[in-house]
Image (tube, rainbow, N blue to C red):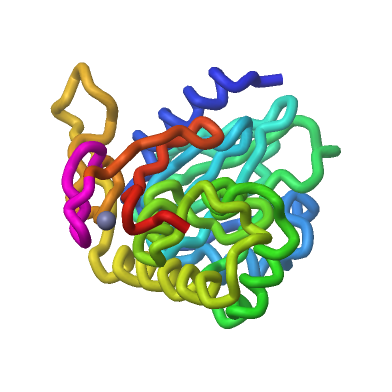
Amino acid sequence: MPELPEVEHVVRALRRVIVGRRILATELNLKRIAPGTSRSAFDRKLRNLRVATVDRRGKYILIEFETGRVLMTHLRMTGKFVCVSADQSLPPYAHVVFYLDDESRLVFCDMRQFAKELLALAPEPLSEEFTEDYFRNTLSRSRRTLKQLLLDQTKVLGLGNIYAVEALFLAGVSPLKTADRLSKLRANLLYQAIRKVLQEAIDAGSTLRIDMSDRNGSYFGTTERFWRVYEREGEPCVNCGAKIRRIVQGGRSTYFCPRCQKR
Ligand SMILES: [Zn+2]
């Protein structure tokens, strides 16, 4: 069973090969690996999406697309990702094949066919199902902090860390607020803000760029996008000039303005 550090290495390896790639088509060979989704629906939901980043939450691997959609996977006992070039044959137990726009194929394989629910698609915040009512209901059922709820890919939105932080700032809501205590007015502001930051990200294209010439640093160099608070600790707030603060919630950095996001 891969432990967290091994999963982190898988995530880093995946970033190197699939960030920026577009999925041209998918092949779901073991249907029960993606429960609740037909082969054609699976393909329709992923086709033409470009990978924005690959992330890890616990031992879940999150492949995040530019649209905000997230593909969540778990390696369980023996699952693994393999990337093969156009002239290589598929590895055994190739349960899912992603055809990428550089002619390579990303394959999810697992010798144990018993595994269920290895792949799940988190809800899509820009879809019609993501209504204000749905969002408020989800908030009202959770006693976690807003930031942590927004990052729970299994229950809520498929938001990444950057978008969650930016949306909270845009809505003027504290990341430390308990979800079920948010007022209706502020819940609606947050709902609008989530859609706005995602739409901005789509309009701006890819959010992250790998610097392949950097031998020592991380794969991600400077982010090209302008963020309102993300990674701006100590800098003046764009609204009020107060210093942006950074705290850690659930192992992830949260950036916020202590003046604009009091409540
Ligand atoms: Zn401020």
Closer-to-camera residue (161/17): 161
58 part of magenta stretch: no
The picture quadrant where one finds residue 202 is: bottom left
Quadrant of the frame with the N terminus: top right
Q: Position of residue 177 (x, y in %)?
A: 55, 52
In the image, residue 214 sits, relative to residue 130, either above or below, namely above
State the residue at coordinates (53%, 44%).
Answer: 62
Give the image location of residue 150, x and y in percent: 55, 54
Is 235 included in the stretch rendered in magenta? Answer: yes
Left or right: residue 50 versus residue 219 is right
Residue name at image x 46 percent, y 50 percent: 160
**Quadrant of res 41:** bottom right
Looking at the image, is 231 positioned above or below residue 224? above
Work out whether 224 lies above or below 55: below
Question: Hey, which residue is sitting farthest right in the picture?
Answer: 114
For the point 59% across and 75% down, which residue is it? 184
**Dominant secondary structure, magenta:** loop
- Residue drawn at x 16%, y 25% as measured from the top left: 214
Q: Give coordinates of residue 196: x percent, y percent.
A: 37, 72
The residue sitting at the left extreme is 213
Q: Nearer the viewer, residue 29 or 23?
A: 23
Q: Which residues are magenta?
A: 232-242
Which of 7 and 103 lies nearest the eye of the viewer?
Answer: 7
Is residue 60 in view from this perspective? yes
